Structure formats: structure tokens, C-alpha cells
Image: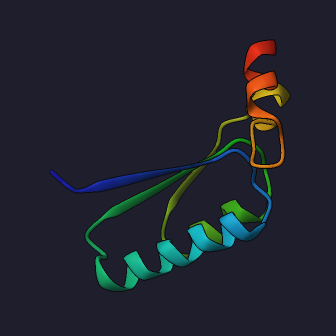
């Protein structure tokens, strides 16, 4: 059975965390090409194309705006309470 790693990104854009994720994919492809990498992104954007170019299987899985907002810049407790 092949080894698999699934990554989840709430957005498909390219910020600092997403660039770090692309770097991880690049290193895995170079040093452990037997591992299947999958990326699920909560919205369309350049992250999906760049991850696919690195060999990851990508899919957009649209998230509700209330879930996409659960990022580092939001007040998580108040958002969780509103869900």
C-alpha cells in the first residue's frame, strides 16, 4: 500500500503558509517520491496549480465563508461560537 500525505489549505491563494506548504511538497518530491501527496484547498487559486506542478494531486473543496475565516487573523473563539 502506498504511503500518502494529505494537506488541507483553507484558501487557494499564496501567502506565507502556502509557500511553506509548496516547499514541503518540493522536498518530499525530491527525497521521498514514493509518497503520494494530496492537497485539498478551500477555494480556487494559484496554490493548486503550483502544487500540481510539484506532483501533488489537487482538488478544490469549497468551504463556507465562515469556515474559511477561521484563520490566524481572526478571533477563533468568537467565530467558533457563531457556528
Q: Judge left or right: residue 48 versus residue 14.
A: left
Q: Judge left or right: residue 6 versus residue 62.
A: left
Q: Judge left or right: residue 46 versus residue 28.
A: right
**Residue 46: percent from left, percent from top:** 77, 65
Residue at x 80% of width, y 24% of height: 79
**Residue 50: percent from left, percent from top:** 66, 72
Residue at x 49% of width, y 73% of height: 24
**Residue 78: percent from left, percent from top:** 81, 23
Between 14 and 45, the one lying in front of the other is: 14
Between 15 and 76, the one lying in front of the other is: 76
Q: Judge left or right: residue 74 versus residue 4.
A: right
* Vertical position of residue 24 compared to residue 6: above or below: below
Residue at x 31% of width, y 54% of height: 4
Between 79 and 4, the one lying in front of the other is: 79
Q: Is residue 77 visible?
A: yes
Q: Quadrant of residue 69?
A: top right
**Residue 16: percent from left, percent from top:** 73, 70
* Vertical position of residue 14 compared to residue 38: above or below: below
* Vertical position of residue 66 compared to residue 61: above or below: above
Quadrant where the C terminus lies?
Answer: top right
Residue at x 78% of width, y 66% of height: 14
Q: Is residue 83 visible?
A: no
Residue at the extreme bottom of the image, as rendered? 30
Q: Quadrant of residue 27?
A: bottom left
Amino acid at each position: 500500500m502506498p504511503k500518502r500525505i494529505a494537506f488541507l489549505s483553507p484558501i487557494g491563494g499564496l501567502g506565507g503558509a502556502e509557500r511553506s506548504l509548496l516547499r514541503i511538497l518540493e522536498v518530499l518530491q525530491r527525497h521521498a517520491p514514493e509518497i503520494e501527496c494530496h492537497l485539498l484547498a478551500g477555494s480556487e487559486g494559484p496554490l493548486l496549480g503550483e502544487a500540481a506542478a510539484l506532483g501533488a494531486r489537487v482538488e478544490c473543496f469549497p468551504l463556507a465563508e465562515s469556515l474559511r475565516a477561521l484563520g490566524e487573523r481572526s478571533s477563533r473563539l468568537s467565530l467558533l461560537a457563531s457556528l
